[in-house]
Image (cartoon, rainbow, N blue to C red):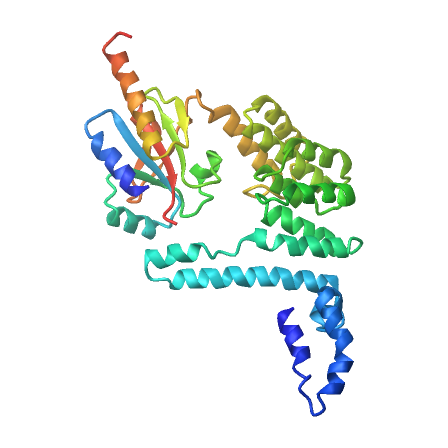
Amino acid sequence: MYPHERSLVKRLEGKPFALLGVNSDPKDRLKQVIKKETMTWRSWWDGGNTSGPIATKWNVSGWPTIYVLDHKGVIRYKNVREKEMDKAVDALLAELQRERSGGK
Amino acid sequence: MKARRSKRLSFAPGRDILIPVLILLPFLLTTAFSALAADDKTGPAASTPAGQYDALVNEFRKAQQDFFKASDAAKTKEVKETLSSSYPQPQNYSPRFLELARKHPKDPVAFDALVWVVTNDRYGQHVNDTLEVLLRDHIENEKLGQVAQALVYSNAREPAKTLERIIEKNPHREVKGTATYSLGLVKQGLDKNAEAEKLFEQVLEKFGDVQGGFRGTLADAARGQLFEIRNLAIGKVAPDIEGEDMEGQNFKLSDYRGKVVVIDFWGDW
């Protein structure tokens, strides 16, 4: 998980992309992991356990749970991992670029 | 069982060997050919079907505990990986639970033994046969809710049909509620969201106070599923997230509008 996410974030540096975490660990643990795994992306700290307000609202009952959103905030993919996540993100970035360059 | 048999043999080499062996012979034969029946006469713990059930459950639990102890103690990844093949598989225990249920069909322990197989070995080869017996002999049991729950993620052939039958025939509110909620989950898993919504609505109306689901009552669970269907499906605009990072800095999902975003619910475990 971590190595793949690290390389995804690195590869897309400077692109209109963000990886955001919602973390269910106690705060000390979260700080340690972020340091140890050199995570450059941000995470919401969700109260220290799996029944935090964000996970509860989003009805999460398995970890990890993944959502991929396009630039309009629309949910486009769920629970894609590793290569599938790369593909999903690349497709949405291409879509965004097409839209920005004003054509199809 | 092994230990008990050897214990009985241990008084064979007495002073006069011949007599004990002759006296023992019928015993040895019954032990060999009808081990469980003979066991009924020995240890007090194993003298009842319930005692035998407890012994089986404990044996499985202990095997699991021993496995996790060994796994924790393993120092290298290689040792851990080799160990992982020795994980005590529930499928190796199911035949003994089923045998117990077959021997004592009238005893309450038969139900418990069948439920053990359906809940612990839910992806195993015995699930469907066991379900058949449960539905035939125990459809009105007040503890059938755990079976309804197990059906959602299992190898059951027709989980929806089975759940519908439980809802129709079981007289207990808790069981009906759990089965209705479980049926909603099954439908949702099949992308039949309209049907799932109806079932979750029913849970809210009729069974909201029943305990169950991932976080408390069936009402909480059903509300969560309804929110997911209505707001978190592919094609919906994601609800905003607002909260603090580990330094206490507030930030929002909507700050990232205009960017492609991956949201990862994670924990370091």
Write the residue at 25% across / 42% down. Answer: A39
Write the residue at 66% across / 73% down. Answer: B4
> Residue B128, position in %: x, y?
66, 40
Q: Residue B75's quadrant in the figure?
A: bottom left
Write the residue at 73% across / 44% down. Answer: B133
- Identity of the residue furthest to the right in this view: B106
**Which residue is at the front of the view, A41 or B20?**
B20
> Residue B30, position in %: x, y?
75, 69
Write the residue at 73% across / 65% down. Answer: B33
Depicted B123 relative to depicted B45: above or below: above
> Residue B242, position in %: x, y?
37, 33
The quadrant of the image that shows the N terminus of chain B is bottom right
**Which residue is at the front of the view, B251 or A95?**
A95
Could you tell me if residue A41 is visible in this image?
A: no
Q: In screen coordinates, is B187 left or right of B255?
A: right
Q: In screen coordinates, is A3 left or right of B10?
A: left
- Identity of the residue furthest to the bottom in this view: B15
